[in-house]
Image (cartoon, grey):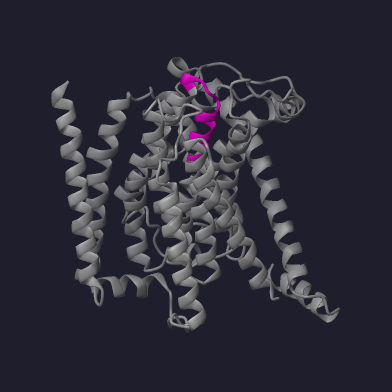
Amino acid sequence: MENAVERFYNAFAAWGVPPVVPQLIVMLVVVSVVILFISVSVMFMIWWERKISAHIQVRYGPMRVGGWHGWAQSIADGIKLLIKEDIIPAGADKVVFALAPMVVFAAALAAYVIIPFGPHLIVRDLNIGVLFYISISSLTVVGIIMAGWSSNNKYSVLGALRSAAQAVSYEIPLVVSVIGVIMTVGSLSMIQIVEAQQRIWFVIPQFLGFLIYLMAAIAECNRLPFDIPEAESELVAGFHVEYSGMRFAIFFLAEYANMFTVSAIATTLFLGGWHGPLLPPWLWFLVKTYFLIFVMMWLRWTLARLRVDQLMYLGWKVLLPLAFLNMGVTGLVLVLRG
Amino acid sequence: MTVTQAVFYILAAFTLGAAFLVVLATNIVHSAIALVFTFFGVAALYILLDAEFLAAVQVLLYVGGITILLLFAIMLTSRISARGVKILNEQAGISALVVFAIFALMAYANLRGIVPAGSPPPASYATASLGRLLLTTYVLPFEAVSILLLAAMVGAIILARRDREKD
């Protein structure tokens, strides 16, 4: 990977082209590959979720499109959403309404910079790694608030407000639960965190941290049992009530892309990243990530939604103290060990 | 002009444009949203200066925390998010004067070289060294800021409680 990029740069340098040109080309290619990966992975996840939900409810789910178990259903849905009419409600704030899905998707896309798919399969190994993800993911909430407010609809404003309250509450346990791993490794870099798990996955010494991270991450993705921002039975659909066609599809895409991101980060921090016997590293990484995604889907279709007050209670009075306890114990053990 | 300089000017223009939008927008929600982009521009400038940690913290705190709370507060106050409400007060002239005075002072300081133009970057901006400095050399200001924030938090809780008892 890196050698090819190096050779590519050298070829341009030999022609006397300034280094900006090949750098821009490499950036464009990498972004296209990431977007392609997100699209394919999201289409698969949507089909998979429909199948899992169907089997949990003793049905078949999509069976017709494409032949084998309706595998092409998501592709057909995607094409349908692309050719639908683009509707902006008359009372909406047009600029903010159009900008909101882009902000949400940009945040989801940016997080893929630090996902280590394999030893050299990472867009950029930033030395602020984990922190980059935590900070960029907070942009999603801004996009959701923009969408909710600009729709000029009571349900969507309520959904956006709930989403803001939820994201602010669950971001703190999320950050604190990750600190245990960072303290053990002594680095924020994703590559170094994975390499530190050569002998033992951090899910064993940091089991409490893993559980807190998983719960807070599900809440950050606005998924059941923490889906009050878009609770269908009370708010119709929450912040995206007024969105349809391609703009709605972008929200949907970003939501599933975020699901992949939080699972990939959990794999990196707690499940040993790409480490594993026999299979190639990238396959191990994907297997672990999709397993966590499966757990998230499984929870979604078996648990009931929390009430708003239960949600706040869980976030502030259960998860946050436990996360601090985890951080304190980790620190103590590290100091005692020297 | 090097590429870094070109990127700097683009980012500076972006940040300043968003900042002007914050002040001049007629709708307070637009101001708040423009503020998000201003903070992002500043974070990008930090990255240009190789201060990655500072950039991440800037986005985490200002975009993820402060702006969201700001938007939250705006939306809970039904009247100010309505369109056509005046959001500038009568002191626009005075504040313009103050802003120009500060700008003139900074321009003067820069031109006279009071602020060293290209101060050499510290040996390492790594997160670890930043943390070590905060807990050794700068532990007193760090603790002072913590106490200030704690006091503000306690104050906010007391204010919120008093309101509830009145109901």
Q: Position of residue A58 (x, y in %)?
A: 53, 16
Q: Is residue A273 toward the left or the right of residue A247 in the image?
A: left
The answer to whether one can see residue B126 in this image is: yes
Asked if residue A150 lies in the magenta stretch, the reply is yes
Q: Quadrant of residue A29?
A: bottom right
Extreme residue toward the right, this view: A15
Q: Nearer the viewer, residue A306 or B21?
A: B21
Establish if B134 lies above or below B15.
below
Establish if B49 lies above or below B82.
below
Q: Nearer the viewer, residue A331 or B159?
A: B159
Query: Which span of residues is magenta-colored?
Result: A142-155
Residue drawn at x 59%, y 25% is A92
Asked if residue B51 lies in the magenta stretch, the reply is no
Q: Position of residue A297 (x, y in %)?
A: 49, 32
* Main SS category, magenta section: helix
In which quadrant of the rendered image does the C terminus of chain A lie? bottom left
